[in-house]
Amino acid sequence: MKIALITDTHFGARNDNIFFDEYFYKFYEGIFFPYLQQHGIKNCIHLGDVMDRRKFVSYRTAKNFRERFLLPFNTLEIDLHMLVGNHDIYYKNTSQVNSLSELLGHRYKNIHIYEDATEVDFDGFPILLMPWINSTNELYAEGMIDETKADVCMGHLEINGFQMNKNVMVSQGGREKEFFRKFDTVMSGHFHHKSDDGQIYYLGTPYELYWNDWEDPKGFHIYDTETKTLERIVNPYTIYEKIYYDDTKENYLEHDTSKYQNKYVKLVVVNKKDLYQFDQFLDKLYQADAFDIKIVEDFSDLDASTVSDDIVNNTEDTVTLLNKYIDDLSIDLSKDRLKDQMRSLYVEAQDLDLE
């Protein structure tokens, strides 16, 4: 059996931004569902964080979710197994109030929702499905790990030693790898950057959500229960573009701006010697119908190769900056615990992003 795996879809992201909404469904309608149909996939597991906001889901997001995400599973006769993620729950200490159960309930025979750890048999191949672990279901989750006969675990997990995104490594606050040592393979959502250590695989988001996803390939996966192999299907669609403007190295009057249509563009001005050329290029950019254009300057005293993303986008390394600041403090408190608290606050702040 081949099972489609997808995670961290975050419907309603970026304050229900309609541009992101259409970008998401461009992937589903152009890549995801056509692939499942063409390859006869009849089972899909969603590894959590279906929705973006923990406190509410807008009517428009709910309508699009039902018509453009759920309905195709029913039309194609695909069973959808949905794990509750931390963004899907209202309270932090329990999964009992969650958006999936409230929106879906038992309305769909082909959709299965998991609030607690559950061993599911896929045509004779057992998989332990592990939704977000909190203080209410923690003991039950530990018991299921001890009892399960499954060699494969799929969940929405926070495990130390993996990257949250390209720039931030989680070293504390999550569970240690030893917690999952009995499994041959662990596949997880939660962290948006794809990475693995040969046993534990973070699958990453299917599309870009924030600027720190720029040039970080996205997509979904197919797991083959017979060969126990994982295949990645890349999403070719992006929404972020960066331009390092240096008119000492390129004639921007000849620059093709058509690829910036329906994109968020960040124009990093490294060298701007010809003001007329710069103004003409800006006009071309605006005429290309980008969603948004941000101009970042002045880096005229730097070479383009020395202008790093850390300089350009100060939000991408916020956790690193906080950790360095804490390391320099002269305090009696546990610095590791303080770093963990600050990282949690940073993640919550991203959830409240109103851009």
Image: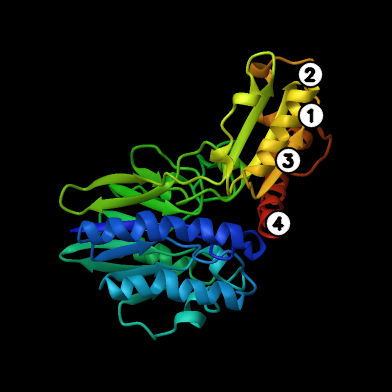
Q: Secondary structure at mark 2?
A: loop
| Percent of width and height locating residue 163 | 53, 40
233 vs 140, left or right, is: left
Quarter of the picture holding the N terminus: bottom left
Which mark is on residue 300? 2
Which mark is on residue 294? 3
| Circle nearer the N terminus (4, 3) | 3
Which mark is on residue 353? 4
Tags 4 and 3 touching, CB below 8 Å: no
| Circle nearer the N terminus (4, 2) | 2
Compute the Cα span from label 1 to label 4.
24 Å
Q: Which residue is mark 1?
A: 297
Tags 1 and 2 touching, CB below 8 Å: yes
Q: Image point 41% across, 62% down: which residue?
A: 142
Residue at the extreme right: 330
| Circle nearer the N terminus (3, 2) | 3
